[in-house]
Image: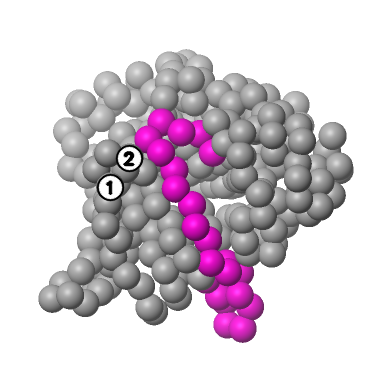
Amino acid sequence: MTAVSSPSDANTKPLVQARNVHKSFDQLEVLKGIDLDIMPGEVVAVLGPSGSGKSTFLRCINHLEDIQQGYIEVDGEQIGYRVKNDRLEKLSQNGIARQRRKIGMVFQQFNLYPHMTVLQNIIEAPVGVHRESRKDAIENAKRLLERVGLSEKANAYPRQLSGGQQQRVAIARALAIKPKLMLFDEPTSALDPELVGEVLATMRDLAKQGLTMIVVTHEISFAREAADRVVFMDGGVIVEQGKPQDVIGNPQHPRTQAFLSRFL
């Protein structure tokens, strides 16, 4: 991998800074030089057709995937690497786990532990990984369940919940580590249509509260109403980005126009 560390501008410092990010799977180049800054408190919706690299880019931010070129910084730290003796050195798994404490991620599938209650699912990482006291973790989990509208489900098991409820628990679980950044990878795509609204409502509330969010989604209404910025990707590159009213309401690039014409 070739990569460089980057200087940070203290006056206008992005929470996320991606520069010239390339990612390939064998001979297939999925990301072809992504440059993107995300400012603290910003909500960015990432749109694009299947296979455009959206989810891969999100996974690279959390170092669930290695990149072959470029760098990604979160909160001033280069994800997955450190500079030692003027050379890049890959972090240990413990070092990567430490970096991930800043980043919460919600996936398409809910990935809840089926043998644990809702409350146990939420406190698992704070207690087991981050060494938070069980008492504090439980108090925080109860606050989070109230925040996502599921206070009465603390002792339920995932099989007793609807898909929408499970995804809201997954959001609470991601928030339990008190992240600076939340990543959402098509969080409503596995839900029945009638359950999508409750998850999007929870995400809208998070956006209003100033949480920095990057949301890969096909929910155009969410992107239009809740995002500060819309990024359209296709073919492993960022084709167009800007305010929702501009990118969704008046797209300039033919690829963006063609994609949005299927939804609007």
- Which residue: 41% across, 31% down? 41
Q: Residues within 10 Å of mark 2 (few under 14, many from 20)?
A: few
Tell me, yes or no, whether the highlighted magenta stretch contains residue 159.
no
Q: Amino acid at mark 2?
A: Thr
Question: Is residue 43 found inside the magenta-colored segment of the image?
Answer: yes
Q: Is residue 140 left or right of residue 144?
A: left
Region in magenta: 23-44
Badge count: 2
Residue 105 shows in the view: no
Label placed on residue 200: none
Pointers 2 and 1 in contact (C-beta within 8 Å): yes
Measured from the top left, where is residue 97 in percent x and y?
A: 28, 56
For the point 75% across and 41% down, the residue is 251
| Quarter of the image where the C terminus is located | top right
Which element type, helix, strand or loop, lies under badge 2? loop
Few, some or many residues within 10 Å of mark 1 (<14, 14–19, 20+): few
**Residue 59 picture location, percent across and down:** 49, 57
Looking at the rendered structure, the secondary structure element under dot 1 is loop
Does the magenta stretch mainly form a helix, a strand or a loop? strand
Residue 149 in view here? yes
Q: Which residue is mark 2?
A: 12
Q: Amino acid at mark 1?
A: Asp
Q: Residue at position x 49%, y 26% from top?
A: 207
**Residue found at x 48% / y 66%:** 21
